[in-house]
Amino acid sequence: MSVVTVQLGQCGNQVGLELFDVISNDAREAQRRTYGSACYDRFFHQTTNGELEARAVLIDMEPKVINHSMTKAAKSGKWRYGEKSHFSQKQGSGNNWANGFCVHGPRNKEVVEELVRREVERCERLAGLMPIMSVAGGTGSGVGTYVTQCLRDTFPKSFILNHLMWPYSTGEVIVQNYNSVLTLAKLYRLSDAILVHENNTIHRICSQLLNIKHITFSDVNRVIAHQLGSVLQPALTQDSYGTYSRNPLGELVTSLVCHPEYKLLGVYTIPQMPSSSIAYSTFTWPGLLKHLRQMLVSNTKMEEGIDWQVRPPSNFERTRGLPTHNFNRSLANLLILRGKDVYSAETGNFEEPALYTSWLPSNEAFNAWKSTVPFDKYEKSATLVNNSQSLLLPLDNIVEKAWNMFASRAYVHQYTKYGITEEDFLESFTSLEQVISSYRHLC
Ligand SMILES: Nc1nc2c(ncn2[C@@H]2O[C@H](COP(=O)(O)OP(=O)(O)OP(=O)(O)O)[C@@H](O)[C@H]2O)c(=O)[nH]1
Ligand SMILES: [Mg+2]
C-alpha cells in the first residue's frame, strides 16, 4: 500500500526532500538484500521508462523552495518529483496563519485537491496521506491546516498522519506561537495522529551526537528523515510474522492512538552518530534497548546525558498514586528494530505495566515491528514511536507564550483582518488546554 505525501511551505518541502532521499537510498540497499519492490511502492511509482517518481504533492505560496527541491531530486539521478505535481504562487503567507488558512488555502483549493487526487489515483492501494509542514510559518501551518481539512472531507476514510515541525523555542518568527496554537487546535480534530519533531531537540542531536559545527536546515532535516524513514520503511509486524506491515500509517495509528484525546506522537532513535564513526562501532541489542528504554522513561531524545535516576513508579507508589519525579508516562509505544540478529532482541522491558497508564493493558499498549534489513548504514538500530507525556512541556510552553501575547492582544489585528476572530483564538486555547490537562493527568 502506498502513502501520498503532501509537502507544504518551506519546511515541508525541505524535510520532504530529505525523506524521499533517505528512503530511496535505503530502498535501493534493501532491494539488493531482500524485500523486493515493497519499499519502493510505498513512496514511489515507476514511470514507463523505469524512473522513480515520488508519490508527493509539493505546495508553497512562493516558488523558490519547490524549484530547489525539484532540481535537487532530479540531480540525485535516483529519483525525482513528478513534473506536474507541484503548485506555487508568487508570494508567501508572510508567517501569518490567517493569511494561509483564510486566503491562500480557499483560493487554491481546487488546484491543490486535483493534484492530490491525481496522486492518489496513481496508487494501486492507498495507505493514507501524510502532510508535512512546520507549525510556525504561514503557508505550512495555515495552508497546511486548510489542506488537511480538505483532505479529511475528500478522503473521509483514509488515514491522515500530519508530520509537524515545532519551532525553535527562541524562534525567528515573532508570531510563531500564535501560528502553532491555531494549527494544533484545528489539526487535533482533523488528523488521526500528529507526529512531532522539535527543532530544538534535533539541533542538539546534530551538535552533540553528530558533532556538526555549523548546523544547517539540511543537517537537521537529514536527522528527521532518518528517524521518519526508520519508522516508515517496511518491517514485519509482530502478530503477522512473515508478512510486512501492509499499511504503515494505519498500523501506526491503530497501535498508538487509542483515544481521540491523545494524538501527539514523538520519536526516539538509537544509535545516531557521524557516518565516519559507524564502521568503528559495535552495538548489542541489550545495550541499545536498555538505553532506549531509559531515554523513554526520562524523556531524553539523545543517548547522551540520559538521567538514569528517573524510574517508573513501584507497585507501592502506583497503588497510592505517589508522584515519581520526571517520569514520562506512556499511553502506547511502537518499537521498530532493524538489522542483524533482530529476532534475538529481547523487548520485554518495554512491556512493563509501570511504564503505562493503568487503563490500557501493557500488551495492547506495546507493539514491535522488526526487519532483518539494516537501515541507513547502521548494522543495528532501534526507533521508538511514542504516545506519552513527552510533548506536554513543549506544548505547554507554546500555549503559555501565545497566551501571554494574546492577553495584550499583540499582533491580533493581523489575524482579524483576514477573518480570524478573537473567539477563534480563545477556542484554540481552550481545546489545547484540554489536551495539556489530559496528558498531564495520565495515570
Ligand atoms: N527542521 C526544519 N525547520 C524549518 C525548515 N525551514 C523552516 N523551518 C522552520 O519552520 C518555521 C518557519 O516556517 P516555514 O516553513 O519557513 O514557513 P512557510 O510554511 O514557508 O510559510 P511562509 O513563508 O510564511 O509562507 C520556523 O520555525 C523554522 O525554524 C527546514 O528546512 N527544516
Ligand atoms: Mg515560506
Image (cartoon, grey):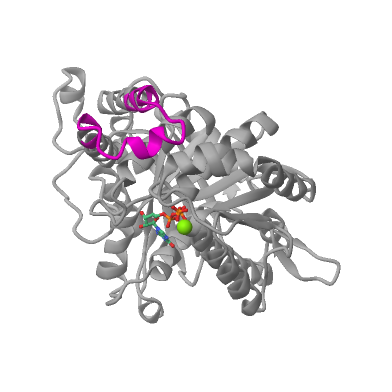
Is residue 291 something one can see in this rendering?
yes
The image position of residue 207, as x and y in percent, is 27, 69
The image position of residue 335, as x and y in percent, is 45, 47
Magenta region: 405-429
Is residue 342 something one can see in this rendering?
no
350 or 255, nearer to the observer = 255
Quadrant in which residue 241 is drawn: top right
Q: In the rendered structure, does residue 412 fall within the stretch colored magenta?
A: yes
- Quick check: 281 left or right of 112? left
- Vertical placement of residue 119 versus 80, above or below: above
- Vertical placement of residue 441 versus 385, above or below: above
Q: In the rendered structure, does residue 60 fall within the stretch colored magenta?
A: no
- Quick check: 247 left or right of 16? right
- Quick check: 93 left or right of 434? right
- Quick check: 302 left or right of 342? left
Ligand 1 - quadrant of the structure image? bottom left
- Vertical placement of residue 166 versus 230, above or below: above
The image position of residue 81, as x and y in percent, is 67, 65
332 or 146, nearer to the observer = 146
Q: Predominant secondary structure in magenta? A: helix
**Looking at the image, how many numbered discs can be counted on the residues?**
0
